[in-house]
Image: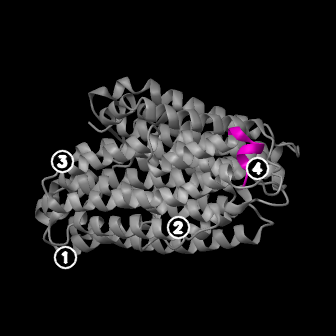
């Protein structure tokens, strides 16, 4: 493998994030100060610098992708677009974390470097053009997120959540690695482009198809698709709420970016996508199961975090419709998926942010009954949560409405009748989801005031919630610019 130092400039944002994580880790270890309030703004600044570098390289990527490090990574608009999503999720989660940790007395400085290290793994996944770098990116991201899940050391549920997440993650990694080994054994290649070129010959080999399906299973764990979802509710509930927000958005977005690259390049051949055991056919079934189970399970939840966890599973099902459409319609389906990921990121971080803001040291107030009368005491927080709930339900004029609209529209461009059935099932599931989202809104506005809420007072939290609420509305009211940007990122 040849190394050209000039290629380091192509991954400058990734280097900034990883170097920033190391810097914050050393600063925390050797500063000797118990006041760690400076770590949060430093984390946000590092993310902002990386976003600035990404935006500065947008115009340079207009002429196509630039493959670097002998085909291991690429610098294209898709990676730039998704890196900005990962960095935004990381910055917002860091802003939510400072006040939450201080209130609950576990203000550990290593949380911020871990957020940056996990984000670095996500950025590696966004730019990965080889099965090797996909594996390295997943492990870099996952190990950091396992530790983040258990970062609330005094809370037994956090340790339990981390253990469940770790065991399921290790199991999924083994399956993924076994799939990669089978694909490499059958093809002799790990580069996605090279695999795509050889797919016409390899598409009939059972070992190659089995490897492809095992890779699909491994990634299914990361997006919490049914039946690989079992870790998500416990992990989301047990983790600190800001970490749950980061897991539900950043990890899911990174996994879907990998799926878009992998199945849009290496396994894009029609015989692999829509054949007898084609991945598009399998994902269509998984999408239906994921949407339906996620929504029906969420209907039964009285715990807000578990409800949002099952909601996240359902949204993975919606997103899989875009992946299926990519196998049937073509790469044009990637644009609506990117739009959906942006809308979902702001909405979900905001929803978990309100959950984090409402709880105090003595009571996290995670039951829906605990939200009774919140609108009369804290109308701004209730309004923000209403915006997030309506967006998750796909109600206009929020970002979630147009996210589903664009996704379903691209799926309907296929002439296959089963795609129409898939969209109809998705629409029915969206209607069902409104029921449990409105339970929270009803409690806040139409129930008698319960216990007096004592929310966390932190400027970082308030600013993050304002950003998420404004972005959720802005993307919904003016959807065209983001849709055009997502389309540019996928060309």
Q: Nearer the viewer, mark 2 or mark 3?
A: 2
- Graded by Cα atoms within 10 Å as few (under 14), some (14 to 19) or many (20 or more), the crowding at tag 4 reads many
Element marked by disc 1: helix
The answer to whether residue 80 is above or below residue 119 is above
Element marked by disc 3: loop
Q: Tag 4 or tag 1, which sits nearer the N-term?
A: 4
Whole-percent x, y for residue 131 in the image? 35, 58
Q: Residue at 13% of width from left, 63% of height from top?
A: 271
Q: Nearer the viewer, mark 3 or mark 4?
A: 3
Q: Nearer the viewer, mark 4 or mark 2?
A: 2
Q: Which residue is mark 1?
A: 206
Q: Tag 3 or tag 2, which sits nearer the N-term?
A: 2
Q: Is residue 189 left or right of residue 91?
A: left
Q: Tag 2 or tag 1, which sits nearer the N-term?
A: 1
Q: Which residue is mark 4?
A: 100
Element marked by disc 2: helix
Whole-percent x, y for residue 48 in the image? 59, 31
Read off the magenta span: 372-380
Residue 186 is inside the magenta segment: no
Q: Which residue is mark 2?
A: 299
Q: Tag 4 or tag 3, which sits nearer the N-term?
A: 4
Q: Residue at 28% of width from left, 65% of height from top?
A: 284
Q: Which residue is mark 3?
A: 413
Residue 465 falls in which quadrant of the image?
A: top right
Q: Residue at 50% of width from left, 28% of height from top?
A: 53
- Tell me the CA gap for discs 4 and 2: 28 Å
- Tell me the CA gap for discs 1 and 3: 31 Å
Q: Are marks 3 and 4 in contact (CB under 8 Å)?
A: no
Q: Are marks 4 and 2 in contact (CB under 8 Å)?
A: no
Q: Nearer the viewer, mark 1 or mark 2?
A: 2
């Amino acid at each position: 493998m040849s190394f050209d130092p000039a290629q380091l400039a192509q991954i400058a944002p990734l280097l900034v994030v990883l170097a920033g994580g190391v810097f914050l880790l050393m600063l925390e270890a050797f500063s000797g100060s118990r006041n760690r309030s400076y770590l949060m703004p430093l984390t946000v600044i590092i993310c902002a610098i990386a976003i600035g570098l990404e935006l500065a390289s947008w115009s340079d990527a207009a002429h196509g992708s630039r493959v670097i490090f002998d085909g291991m990574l690429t610098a294209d608009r898709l990676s730039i677009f998704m890196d900005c999503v990962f960095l935004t999720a990381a910055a917002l989660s860091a802003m939510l974390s400072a006040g939450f940790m201080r209130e609950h007395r576990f203000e550990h400085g290593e949380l911020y470097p871990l957020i940056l290290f996990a984000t670095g793994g996500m950025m590696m996944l966004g730019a990965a053009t080889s099965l090797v770098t996909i594996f390295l990116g997943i492990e870099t991201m996952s190990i950091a997120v396992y530790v983040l899940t258990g970062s609330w050391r005094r809370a037994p549920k956090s340790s339990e959540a981390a253990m469940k997440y770790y065991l399921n993650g290790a199991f999924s990694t083994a399956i993924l690695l076994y799939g990669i080994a089978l694909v490499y054994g059958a093809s002799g290649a790990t580069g996605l482009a090279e695999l795509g070129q050889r797919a016409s010959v390899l598409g009939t080999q059972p070992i190659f198809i089995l490897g492809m399906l095992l890779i699909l299973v491994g990634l299914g764990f990361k997006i919490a698709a049914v039946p690989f979802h079992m870790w998500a509710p416990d992990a989301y509930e047990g983790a600190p709420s800001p970490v749950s927000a980061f897991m539900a958005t950043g990890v899911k977005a990174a996994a879907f970016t990998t799926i878009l690259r992998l199945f849009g390049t290496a396994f894009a051949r029609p015989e692999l996508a829509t054949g007898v055991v084609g991945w598009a056919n399998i994902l269509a079934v998984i999408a239906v199961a994921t949407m339906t189970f996620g929504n029906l399970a969420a209907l039964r939840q009285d715990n807000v975090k578990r409800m949002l966890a099952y909601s996240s599973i359902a949204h993975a099902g919606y997103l899989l419709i875009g992946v299926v459409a990519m196998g049937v319609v073509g790469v044009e389906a990637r644009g609506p998926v990117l739009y959906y990921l942006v809308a979902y990121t702001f909405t979900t971080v905001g929803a978990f942010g309100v959950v984090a803001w409402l709880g105090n040291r003595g009571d996290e107030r995670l039951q829906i009954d605990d939200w009774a009368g919140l609108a009369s005491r804290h109308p701004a927080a209730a309004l923000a949560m209403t915006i997030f709930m309506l967006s998750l339900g796909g109600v206009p004029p929020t970002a979630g409405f147009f996210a589903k609209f664009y996704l379903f529209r691209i799926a309907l461009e296929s002439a296959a009748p089963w795609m129409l059935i898939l969209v109809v099932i998705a629409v029915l599931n969206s209607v069902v989801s409104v029921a449990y989202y409105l339970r929270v809104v009803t409690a806040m506005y139409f129930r008698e005031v319960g216990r007096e809420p004592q929310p966390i007072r932190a400027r970082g939290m308030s600013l993050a919630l304002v950003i998420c609420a404004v972005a959720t509305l802005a993307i919904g009211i003016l959807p065209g610019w983001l849709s055009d940007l997502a389309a540019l990122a996928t060309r």
